[in-house]
Amino acid sequence: MLRNTCVYPPDHQVGYLNASRADLLRLGALFRVAATSPHSAVHVPVPPDARSMTFGDRDTHPLPVLLARDDTELRPSDWPELRRRMRRAPVPLSVTAPAARPPDRPDDVRRRADRHPARFTEHAATIVITARAELLFWMGDWLTAVGDRVARDSRVHQHGESLLGDMVGFFDPEGTNRPMHAFCVVAVEPIFHRARWREQAAHGGDHGEPVGGGRQSSGD
């Protein structure tokens, strides 16, 4: 489980992906795993201690994510039955993700992504992302590159979190906001999050151990 990853559905066509450095690297690998097979899907559950994020006057709760190539012909309406089967299935096998490549892509790949962007759908309280294999690889490489920047980001060290960039162009290259324009990717590192240290100290926790799991709400 990605214990420090929360994906928040779009508010005004902009969603949020909050994750630690390690989880961003794992998530990049999971996108590449999803890209390798037309017969598989990757499920990313919500951490058990995940918190809501405030958008304006309402709270938005994180949702689990399902990743698949579009040639799996997976329909969002198929997900409830798949989820029931997963609960009855044995422990999944380990897989090896393809190595990350530089996130830059040739112009012809960018043009293909513009013609066939990723599809983003919400169904049965799950975010379903489907895309052509090359686009899933590209998204995974982009997330890996972002994760590699976390350790050098001064705001993460100072504040425990930092906006690293917008995942623009994968879902809606022309910015029409149908159904979503971008994911804002925020690094959240529990070991640096001062609010967590203060909360732990207030409850008499051991100052020698970092607090893990979940994310802080936008007020932290």
Image (cartoon, grey):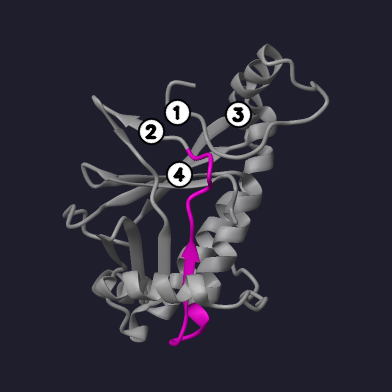
How busy is the neighbourhood of tag 3: few (under 14 within 10 Å), some, or many (20 plus)?
Answer: many
Residue position for label 4: 165
- Of badges 4 and 3, nearer the viewer stands 3
Q: Observer-nearest residue: 156 or 27? A: 27
Question: Callout 3, which amino acid?
Answer: Gly
Residue position for label 1: 217
Q: Observer-nearest residue: 206 or 183? A: 206
Nearest to N terminus: mark 1 or mark 4? 4
Do the residues under discs 4 and 2 have CB atoms within 8 angstroms? no
Across and down, in percent, residue 147 comes to 60, 50
Residue position for label 3: 160
Question: What residue is drawn where x is 63% and y is 42%?
Answer: 150
Nearest to N terminus: mark 3 or mark 2? 2
Can residue 171 be seen here? The reply is yes
Residue 78 figure quarter: bottom left
Determine whether, in the image, residue 92 is placed left or right of residue 182. right
How busy is the neighbourhood of tag 1: few (under 14 within 10 Å), some, or many (20 plus)?
Answer: few
